[in-house]
Image (cartoon, rainbow, N blue to C red):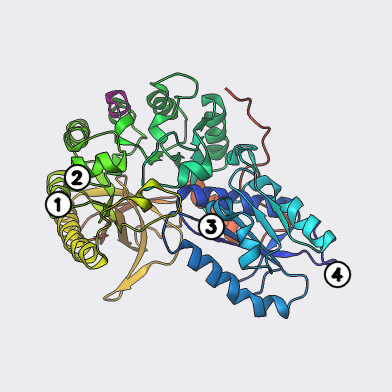
């Protein structure tokens, strides 16, 4: 067990996560590794013995955010002898030795390919009393093969691949995560079955380009086959996936979504821009017509599907006409929601050195116009949900209380956020339980369901309730360590 030199007390940890779903997935493994090594989670308000930053490098201010947070720990570390700070993730992979040059009080730097090394690096740094830097250029083991500690008893991420073979000019991820590496289908389905045995109801298949899954072992239909195989797992009620690429979005995937009952009627498909000229400069291998064609086919197969997207405003060379093309696609696609971003330079990407960088004030003005349109359409789309009866999977966290009505929050099958009234006469749900309720009100970013018809208590709710009760030391919710899967 990891201990202080002068005490048998288990050392405590805190993991701070920034960035995408892949980082969240990695952080679950980091916490599992630390607990497997004998560390325990620091209580709220407690200064942890080990603070781990799992970083993102996608946004322009990622560097400033990290170094600002690191500087805040200098006085904390000064009054807590033996405290250790570790930095991992995409920014660590990118900056490597620069982190120690800028923040010499950091004890460990590790990359995206070797998160499993963290406990050993911490111990080496403690014994040698000097910083340890270990950055691998190739994947050591799939994160899913490492111990994990999940925050949720009812939902889990399952990685199908890591890395990306695309070369989008605005994105630094491929250089930090490497080329695509696919897990074998049997390993993925084995992990899902183990999760369901633990009580998990919902899984999200995860990949930088999730629907390109199978390219490494030469099966272009591998992703649709995987979705259909998920439909044969007893007890698995909800299957989602993120994020697909329009280039690889094929009709067999649409058919698998529509014909597999536990694959949810939800699609998050990044668009980035509606302008063919901008998409070409972004090196996105599709155009407006193809994107809208995919959406039309998805809606034909699944009329109630909720479709969301990512949009970048102000990419280098974007003209007013280019921007209006994006607005046109938003109107045509009728997105249930969109993650909108103002373009920002990322060193190391081709876009950072392109001519015709758009002035900030122009980007800001276009961004506001886009946001207004996205909100207007998402509200209108939410209004169409009024009167529908939905099965809402209640989520972790506190509910809401409006006009003396107590509510709990969860997700509809199409992933819309729903605030559901608590009706003791019907039953009080727990996180992981399913509430059947009628939508009575819509707002731009959520629905309200005040007419509760039924509450179904689930095994996930039972597991979550048990996990929230005091547990003996060493109990960990999640998968044990798994052997490394053979490479395809």
Task: Tell which of 416 and 117 is nearer to you.
Answer: 117
Quadrant into which the N terminus falls: bottom right
List x then y, in percent, for residue 343.
31, 57
Residue 274 numbered mark, or none: 2
Q: How crowded is mark 2: few (under 14 residues within 10 Å), some or many (20 or more)?
A: many
Q: Label 2 to label 3, Cα distance in Å?
A: 30 Å
Residue hosting label 3: 55
For the record, the magenta segment spans 250-254
Secondary element type, mark 4: loop
Q: Is residue 80 left or right of residue 244?
A: right
**Sooner in the amino-acid sequence: mark 4 or mark 2:** 4
The earlier-in-sequence mark between 1 and 4 is 4
Q: Which of the image's four quarters has the C terminus? A: top right
In three-dimensional space, the C-alpha distance between marks 2 and 1, rounded to whole angstroms, equals 7 Å
Circle 4 or circle 2, nearest the eye: 2
Query: On the picture, is 328 further left or further right than 3?
Result: left
* In the image, residue 1 above or below residue 83: above
Q: Mark 1 points at which residue?
A: 327
Task: Give whichever of 260, 254 is nearer the camera.
Answer: 254
Vertical placement of residue 111 versus 219, above or below: below
Residue under the point 19% across and 60% down: 375
Q: Can residue 14 be seen in this view?
A: no
**SS assignment at label 3:** strand
Q: Residue at x 69, y 58 (%)?
A: 108
As for residue 305 lying within the magenta part, the answer is no
Q: Is residue 261 visible?
A: yes
Gap between marks 4 and 2 measured at Cα: 60 Å
Write down the residue under mark 4. Answer: 7
Q: Residues within 10 Å of mark 4 (few under 14, many from 20)?
A: few
SS at mark 1? helix
């Amino acid at each position: 067990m990891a201990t202080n030199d002068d005490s048998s007390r288990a050392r405590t940890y805190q993991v701070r996560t920034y960035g995408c779903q892949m980082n969240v997935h990695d952080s679950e493994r980091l916490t599992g590794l630390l607990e497997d090594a004998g560390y325990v989670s620091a209580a709220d308000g407690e200064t942890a013995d080990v603070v781990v930053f799992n970083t993102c490098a996608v946004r322009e201010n990622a560097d400033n955010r990290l170094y600002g947070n690191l500087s805040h720990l200098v006085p904390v570390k000064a009054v807590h002898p033996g405290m250790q700070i570790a930095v991992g993730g995409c920014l660590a992979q990118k900056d490597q030795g620069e982190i120690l040059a800028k923040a010499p009080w950091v004890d460990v730097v590790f990359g995206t390919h070797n998160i499993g090394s963290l406990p050993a690096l911490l111990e080496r740094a403690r014994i040698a009393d000097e910083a340890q830097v270990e950055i691998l250029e190739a994947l050591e083991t799939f994160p899913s093969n490492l111990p994990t500690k999940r925050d949720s008893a009812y939902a889990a991420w399952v990685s199908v691949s890591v890395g990306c073979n695309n070369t989008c000019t605005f994105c630094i991820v491929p250089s930090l995560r490497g080329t695509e590496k696919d897990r074998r289908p049997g390993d993925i389905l084995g992990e899902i079955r183990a999760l369901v045995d633990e009580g998990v109801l919902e899984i999200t298949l995860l990949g930088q380009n999730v629907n390109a899954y199978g390219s490494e072992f030469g099966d272009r239909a591998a992703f649709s086959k995987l979705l259909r195989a998920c439909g044969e797992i007893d007890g698995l009620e909800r299957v989602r996936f993120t994020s697909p690429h329009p280039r690889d979005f094929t009709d067999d995937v649409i058919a698998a979504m529509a014909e597999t009952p536990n694959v949810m009627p939800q699609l998050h498909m990044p668009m980035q821009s509606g302008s063919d000229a901008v998409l070409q400069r972004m090196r996105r291998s599709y155009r407006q017509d193809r994107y809208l064609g995919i959406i039309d086919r998805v809606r034909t197969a699944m009329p109630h599907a909720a479709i969301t997207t990512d949009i970048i405003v102000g990419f280098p060379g974007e003209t007013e006409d280019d921007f209006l093309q994006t607005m046109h696609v938003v109107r045509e696609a009728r997105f249930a929601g969109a993650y909108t971003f103002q373009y920002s330079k990322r060193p190391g990407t081709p876009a950072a050195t392109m001519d015709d960088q758009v002035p900030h004030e122009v980007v800001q003005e276009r961004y506001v116009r886009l946001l207004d349109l996205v909100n207007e359409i998402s509200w209108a789309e939410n209004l169409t949900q009024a009167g529908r009866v939905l099965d809402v999977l209640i989520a972790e966290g506190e509910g809401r209380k409006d006009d003396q009505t107590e509510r709990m929050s969860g997700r509809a099958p199409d992933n819309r956020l729903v605030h559901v009234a608590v009706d003791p006469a019907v039953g009080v749900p727990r996180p992981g339980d399913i509430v059947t309720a009628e939508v009575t009100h819509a707002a731009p970013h959520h629905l309200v369901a005040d007419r509760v018809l039924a509450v179904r208590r689930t095994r996930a709710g039972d597991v979550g309730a048990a996990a929230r009760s005091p547990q003996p030391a060493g109990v960990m919710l999640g998968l044990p360590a798994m052997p490394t899967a053979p490479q395809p």
